[in-house]
């Protein structure tokens, strides 16, 4: 499943690359670094938005699974999380990548955009399934793992672009942390609500200051 997801992401990148036409003058080294840093800052902003939204969703989901939140409260939490995930996916897609950048860096940034957009879209779908009795714990876990794979792939490609631009050194703490990270195995524990409220998975997040990735077990 993970290989199929990555293959699909790479195919989309190949199509976009084939359709691109770069006739602009090459950017200077300083301009390349500025463009890549701005791109990184944008992705970090979206990551923070997603993190805040996920925390609120997790809190509501935990309350719902223990009977402390009503159906209407849970429905609102799901709607809010879906809206945020959908908005982030749209905003990620609209992030501009300068055509004056070197082709290798442009390709890496395109790959990260597609991966991040895919991750947030999958998160949106997963939230719809979180309290659905028609979705098994295995199916719910699979969606979360797909989102993790896409997110981790996007982060790795973004860090490759940062290395290529000279913003970070190869093998630095930022890339070492991501290289050793992996997706978590969800632990299924269905409550009486027949939801997947207590299913956990690993979310890979980026620190906007250091670029380091951390693995945090969250309820999704």
Image (spheres, grey):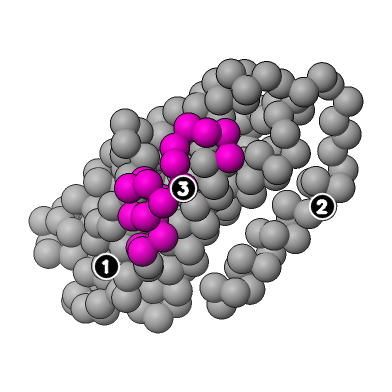
Residue at mark 1 to residue at mark 3: CA–CA distance: 32 Å
Quadrant assignment for the N terminus = bottom right
Which label was assigned to residue 170? 3
Q: Is residue 209 above or below residue 178?
A: above
Residue at 41 percent across and 51 percent down: it is: 171
Q: Determine the image quadrant of residue 165.
A: top right
Quadrant assignment for the C terminus = bottom left
Residues in magenta? 164-181
Looking at the image, tell me whether mark 2 or mark 3 is earlier in sequence order.
2
Residue 104 in sight in this render: yes
Question: Dot 1: within a 10 Å radius of its alpha carbon, few (fewer than 14), some, or many (20 or more) residues?
Answer: many
Asked whether the residues under the numbered discs 2 and 3 touch, taking CB atoms below 8 Å apart as contact, a structural biologist would say no
Q: Is residue 19 above or below residue 146?
A: above
Per the image, label 3 sits on a secondary structure element best described as: loop
Looking at the image, tell me whether mark 1 or mark 2 is earlier in sequence order.
2
Query: Which residue is denoted by mark 1 in the rendering?
Result: 200
| 158 relative to 172 in the view: left or right | right
- Is residue 61 found inside the magenta-colored segment of the image? no
Q: Determine the image quadrant of residue 186.
A: bottom left
| 36 relative to 97 in the view: left or right | left
Dot in front, 1 or 2: 2
Dot in front, 1 or 3: 3
Viewer-side residue, 84 vs 74: 84
Question: Dot 2: within a 10 Å radius of its alpha carbon, few (fewer than 14), some, or many (20 or more) residues?
Answer: few
Dot in front, 2 or 3: 3
Percent coordinates x, y for residue 75 in the rendering: 33, 51
Query: Which residue is denoted by mark 2 in the rendering?
Result: 15
Percent coordinates x, y for residue 61 in the rendering: 24, 57
| 208 relative to 13 in the view: left or right | left
Per the image, label 2 sits on a secondary structure element best described as: helix
């Amino acid at each position: 499943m993970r290989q199929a997801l990555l293959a699909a992401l790479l195919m989309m990148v190949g199509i976009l690359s084939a359709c691109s036409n770069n006739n602009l003058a090459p950017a200077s080294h300083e301009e390349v670094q500025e463009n890549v840093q701005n791109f990184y800052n944008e992705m970090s902003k979206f990551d923070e938005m997603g993190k805040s939204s996920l925390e609120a969703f997790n809190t509501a989901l935990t309350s719902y699974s223990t009977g402390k939140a009503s159906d209407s409260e849970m429905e609102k939490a799901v709607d809010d999380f879906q809206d945020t995930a959908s908005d982030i996916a749209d905003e990620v897609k609209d992030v501009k990548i300068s055509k004056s950048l070197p082709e290798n860096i442009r390709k890496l940034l395109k790959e990260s955009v597609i991966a991040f957009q895919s991750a947030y879209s999958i998160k949106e779908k997963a939230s719809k399934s979180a309290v659905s009795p028609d979705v098994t714990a295995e199916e719910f876990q699979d969606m979360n793992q797909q989102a993790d794979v896409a997110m981790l792939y996007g982060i790795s490609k973004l860090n490759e672009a940062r290395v290529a631009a000279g913003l970070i050194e190869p093998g630095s703490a930022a890339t070492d942390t991501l290289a050793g990270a992996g997706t978590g195995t969800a632990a299924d524990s269905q409550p009486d609500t027949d939801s997947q409220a207590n299913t956990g998975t690993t979310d890979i997040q980026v620190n906007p200051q250091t670029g380091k990735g951390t693995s945090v077990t969250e309820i999704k």
